[in-house]
Amino acid sequence: MGLSSDFLLKDKTVSNFSLAGSMAIKSLISPQATHFSYVEVTLQKPLSLMAFTLCMRVATELRGEREIILFAYRIPSHDELNVWRELDGRFSIYIGGEGVHFHIPELSSMQTQLCVTWDSSSGAAAFFINDKKSLTKIFKRGHIIRSEGRIVLGQDPDAFLGGFDVKQSFVGEILDVNLWDYVLSDTEVQDTFVRKRGNVIDWETTQLNINGEVVVVDVQL
Amino acid sequence: MGLSSDFLLKDKTVSNFSLAGSMAIKSLISPQATHFSYVEVTLQKPLSLMAFTLCMRVATELRGEREIILFAYRIPSHDELNVWRELDGRFSIYIGGEGVHFHIPELSSMQTQLCVTWDSSSGAAAFFINDKKSLTKIFKRGHIIRSEGRIVLGQDPDAFLGGFDVKQSFVGEILDVNLWDYVLSDTEVQDTFVRKRGNVIDWETTQLNINGEVVVVDVQL
Amino acid sequence: MGLSSDFLLKDKTVSNFSLAGSMAIKSLISPQATHFSYVEVTLQKPLSLMAFTLCMRVATELRGEREIILFAYRIPSHDELNVWRELDGRFSIYIGGEGVHFHIPELSSMQTQLCVTWDSSSGAAAFFINDKKSLTKIFKRGHIIRSEGRIVLGQDPDAFLGGFDVKQSFVGEILDVNLWDYVLSDTEVQDTFVRKRGNVIDWETTQLNINGEVVVVDVQL
């Protein structure tokens, strides 16, 4: 599946009022499971990471009956940085094709602020769910996340940008996806809820390529 | 098991960058159950206590299927101050070889701020879980916790510094262990989450002797 | 059972140090079920109420297997104002011998701030559990709570001050019992957690008559 049917977010925004003193951000709604709906996030700089913080807000009514892809960064040969809700309810981070799993509170219809941090020098990886931090696991110490990939929300690309599986697709709402090339402090991660912007992905300014049935609405923060 | 293989924390810190305005503290990660991984906490003054407040942050994926040692202070003849998660899910404080049990919320993969207070003059003992205080129990009134012991994290020493049981070992993450020789006020205990430092163990400055597979990472608060 | 074995709280306080800038209040610990341990709360003015707010902090390890008396105000002929945790887990308010029941979150080992409000002119009665308010029920509209009674914590008096049943006794910790002769605003009720004092019972200054195995400790707030 190529990029020929892509178009830019600004053309598809369905709600675009704004209130004085507030800020509107885009929110992505995937009403149903498909093998063709996804959003590509345009990178503002090449993604070569020795550390990262990834945050998003996510809400879904999907229960524990299947895998759910939450974030996919794939280079031509393999998945380089993925975040999953697994079949058994655990969450996982895949880096360079290998995964580490966490038992953390489940997603629900209520928005969850979900962040992931990882640092190559120590291998320390952790989740944050709302204002709570998980235990830290040591994982892929010394690895460097490679550039020249593409970021996809809503589907797990088994090919560079395609090979999607409806049973792994995301159904629900994702917004405010921000990515930093370093590990924010615990306090800063908790502050991301109140409007910190990534230096690799900045959700306020990043360009989104919408495909399929994804609906974009503006949310007043 | 002696101290011959010990080495100091500073030599083993695997990540040591710092951000302006934030503070880094050491975090201890025990990736798996062993009978040989533990951390000895060097005491800054002899531990002769008529009262105490002990706080730590702890996260674990261990479920209710076995005992978990959370803190051990042993003198040559016996355990003088231990904190356990018991087989049946209750928490316990052992002082001078005797225990008192509490039904309190269970530990999880998400970090819990756990504090214990005890005062010899009244015998009042209580747990704090995050910002909640448990009921108070009367226990070991008049006892004085004896000096000349050693503090071990991650294992229960059945001998002075050895006799470890893999089935009691800690698996997960422990950090920010602080000990005071008096009972902090309820408000102060809740404030320990935001960086109060013990006068008997001060986690920021205390020297740790790392043994076995414990990984030390720096966490930016 | 008379008052001959009573003695004053100040004589029984077992821990009485104080820290600069903090405040100590008395906490009542009932280590086990008895038919003879109780605390009588001395009234600072006669209790003739057309409305009230009653607050306390309470923690218990008792599970749902039996009734638990939380507050009893009895006049010679009958119970005039009682608060119960019922056999079926519901909470109830009895006024003038009649009760109203609420399904609210259960008590636990962790301290719960529990408040009850009632107003004769409307009959509106509600519970507050920590910072949450229950639904309102209409109950005993027009009733006036009569004076010349006695307040007992820990037992349900079936006679004026006696006739206790071990199976209804309170086991655990009760503190910070305050009573007002009017209905506080919702916000004020939530503020009681941070040190508001009743105008009918003020826990800081009220005199307590301790009987049996109740232990009194000072808690630094």
Image (spheres, coloured by chain):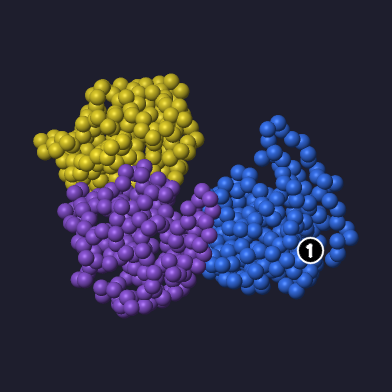
Chain colours: A blue, B purple, C yellow
Taking the spot 89% from the left edge, 60% from the top edge, the residue there is: A4
Quick check: C123 above or below A213? Answer: above
In the displayed structure image, the side of residue B28 where residue B103 appears, left or right: left
Quick check: C127 above or below B170? Answer: above
- The residue at the far left in this view is C4
Taking the spot 22% from the left edge, 68% from the top edge, the residue there is: B75
Chain that bears disc 1: A
Which quadrant holds the C terminus of chain C?
A: top left
State how many labels appear. Answer: 1
In the displayed structure image, the side of residue A22 where residue C157 appears, left or right: left
Q: Which residue is mark 1?
A: A35
Residue A160 image position (x, y, % from top left):
79, 69
Q: For mark 1, does the 10 Å Cα neighbourhood hold few (<14), some (14 to 19), or many (20 or more) residues?
A: some
Quick check: C105 above or below A126? Answer: above
In the displayed structure image, the side of residue C182 where residue C8 appears, left or right: left
Residue A199 image position (x, y, % from top left):
67, 53
Quick check: C200 above or below B113? Answer: above
Q: Is residue C212 visible?
A: yes
Asked whether C139 or B64 is in front, the reply is B64
Residue C80 image position (x, y, % from top left):
30, 29
What amino acid does circle 1 point to?
His
Q: Quadrant of residue A200?
A: bottom right
SS for tag 1? loop
Q: Quadrant of residue C102?
A: top left
Which quadrant holds the N terminus of chain C?
A: top left
Residue B95 image position (x, y, % from top left):
24, 61
Taking the spot 16% from the left edge, 53% from the top edge, the residue there is: B142
In the displayed structure image, the side of residue C66 where residue A163 appears, left or right: right
Asked whether A167 or A90 is in front, the reply is A90
Taking the spot 26% from the left edge, 52% from the top edge, the residue there is: B181
